[in-house]
Image (cartoon, helix red, strand yellow):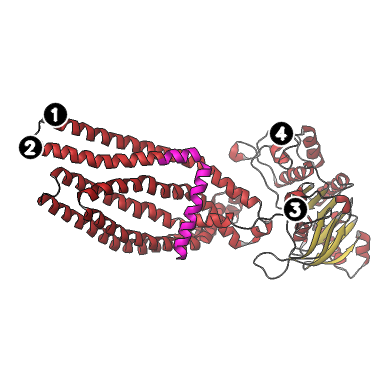
Amino acid sequence: MERRNSFIKSVLRTVPMQFRAAPRQTAANNLLSIVHALTWTLGVVATQRLFDAITRAAAGDAGFADCLIPLLFLAAVTFGQQILNGIHNFYWSIVEGKAQPYYRKRLFRKLSVLDPAVFENTEFLDDVNKARDGVWWLVPYSMTFLNIFTFYGVFFVSVGFYLWSLKPVLLVTLLAAFIPAVIGQTVRGKVFTKLEEESAPLRRENGHYQSALCDREFFKETRILGGYRFFHRLFTDTLKLLTQKTWKAERKTALLQLALNLLSFAGIAVSAILLFNATMSGEVSIGAFAAVFRALDTVFSIMQEIVNSHLGDMNQNLGKVANYFRVLDMPERVGEPGAPDLTLGITAENVSFTYPGREEPAVKGVTLTLNDGETVAIVGENGAGKSTLVRLLTGLYRPSEGKVTVGGLDTSLTDPSSLYQNTSGVFQGYQRYKMTLAENVEISDTAAGDANRMETVLRDADADMTIPPDTMLSPEFDGIDLSGGQWQRIAIARGLYRSNGFIVLDEPTSAIDPIEETRIYEQFRRLSEGKCAVVVTHRLGSAKLAKKIIVMDGGRIVDIGTHEELLARSEGKYADMWAAQARWYARSS
């Protein structure tokens, strides 16, 4: 029952969506299907007329001219069938080309309004992988279902009337032959839905290993460090496991389908015997016998096509289509619109946050206030919760407990776009977009279109000003390559280009030496005057530029103060970290 309900729900959602995605093309395709189906039935009638004419001519009751017209009629119908078949197949690609972008846009839009925290959940990432795979099956799924009615349905109804008019039992035996095939596809669909659930995590793993072997970002490290064989083995192992699971499912369903196909064939054989007896007894003419024999062959082929191919594909891909709708049905992050007043600052009241699928909170009971015009540094060892706290303060994540307000707006109750409208940031995991230099900077504020402003932020970030703005930053697209440090400066320029009253630098300078980092943070402090600003850094030499330093450890704030105040507390965490880094630089020099 659950399986049937899932199939029905998927059909009820895909068909209306298909008409929204490509209304004219879908309607035209189904009209073609109806006309195409009627030509097949017309071919059966034309066959009867031709053979009846030949029979009369053989008996001396008709001449050559009486046979010529039915022959030309059958030839015209057969030619028309082939023409319509070609047009129908060609038009299918037009429908697919029109609808596919719509389905992708729906998925991408949905992903853009989900709570960003769900992207930390591996189960969700598996669901996204399945949904992206499901996009490619939505058009075949919906169009196949429609064609079952508009083509196969019309053919069966029209030829069914024809068979019923000759001998009603012929139609009954054909329907009985159809039932075993449907049972087989029901089982097949269940097996392949389970296969899809088991395969999605393996596909993600296999895709990652393939990237490690082939992608430009990985090849230097995998070759120099000798990781090629390691990743090749992992790629091969996961591919082998995927293949084994698929083979097991195919073997199980193929054996069942073979047995059920034999039952269907038996039903067709019974129909053929009944037809022969009816012809010998004079109930039907020889022309009708030839026409029905042709119809039986066509009906059997079409049954196999519907059940083994179309219904089989629908059942096999039901899981993929269902996964697409599973993501579309996920709750969106919504809230009330508003305009943050950053003169009110940013506050966190007893805030805790736990990542999906984890038990230990990443941030625990944090309370703090960022005042307007204040530059704050957040420091701590790896895993202390610094970046998670920043995501909470910007409203990117909603707290599991407690309350965060940005400019007087509660982040748990406010529409995310309202929270982000005056916020900018540069993060450690910055993106290297395969676009021009100008586009890499302007992507943070595409509506601005200010060349002078772009030149200013590139200079402030100390980016290479000798590169023309229209230079493609990707060797894959006939562009140039940049060093890690150059990319970081462009990422910083991108963050500065966006108009903001609250800006965050979350360890964006890991590929820049400490001296240059200090200069960038000095520039950042100058540029962020009069704004709320947060700097996350593991280099305490840069942190001392802030008016206030927040020290984190184990997800908690363990100390707050200026650089001098924190150093004065000789037993404090900050003093220990400062001493450790000072010894490291001393040894390095």
Residue 182, how many percent across, how many down? 35, 59
The reply to whether dot 3 and dot 4 touch (C-beta < 8 Å) is no
Main SS class of the magenta portion in the image: helix
Three-letter residue code for mark 4 = Pro
- CB under 8 Å between callouts 2 and 4? no
In the displayed structure image, the side of residue 150 where residue 226 appears, left or right? right
Q: Which residue is at 50% across, 50% downward?
A: 14
Q: Name the residue under label 3.
A: 336
User: Label 1 amino acid?
Assistant: Ala
* Residue linked to disc 4: 469
Q: Give the range drawn in magenta.
A: 1-30
Residue at image point 59% right, 62% down: 123
Which of disc 1 and disc 2 is earlier in sequence?
Answer: 2
Is residue 19 on the magenta stretch?
A: yes
Dot 3, how many residues are within 10 Å of its Cα: few (below 14), some (14-19), or many (20+)? some
How far is mark 2 from mark 4, CA to CA? 86 Å
- Quadrant (top left/top right/bottom left/bottom right) for the C terminus: bottom right
Earlier in the chain: of badge 3 and badge 4, it is 3
Residue nearest the observer in this picture, 123 or 150: 150
Q: Mark 2 points at which residue?
A: 58
Give the percent coordinates (x, y) of residue 543.
85, 56
User: Which residue in the structure is indicated by mark 1?
Assistant: 65
Q: Closer to the camera, 113 or 25?
A: 25
Circle 4 residues within 10 Å: few <14, some 14–19, many ≥20 = some
User: Marks 3 and 2, Cα distance to the nearest angstrom?
Assistant: 86 Å
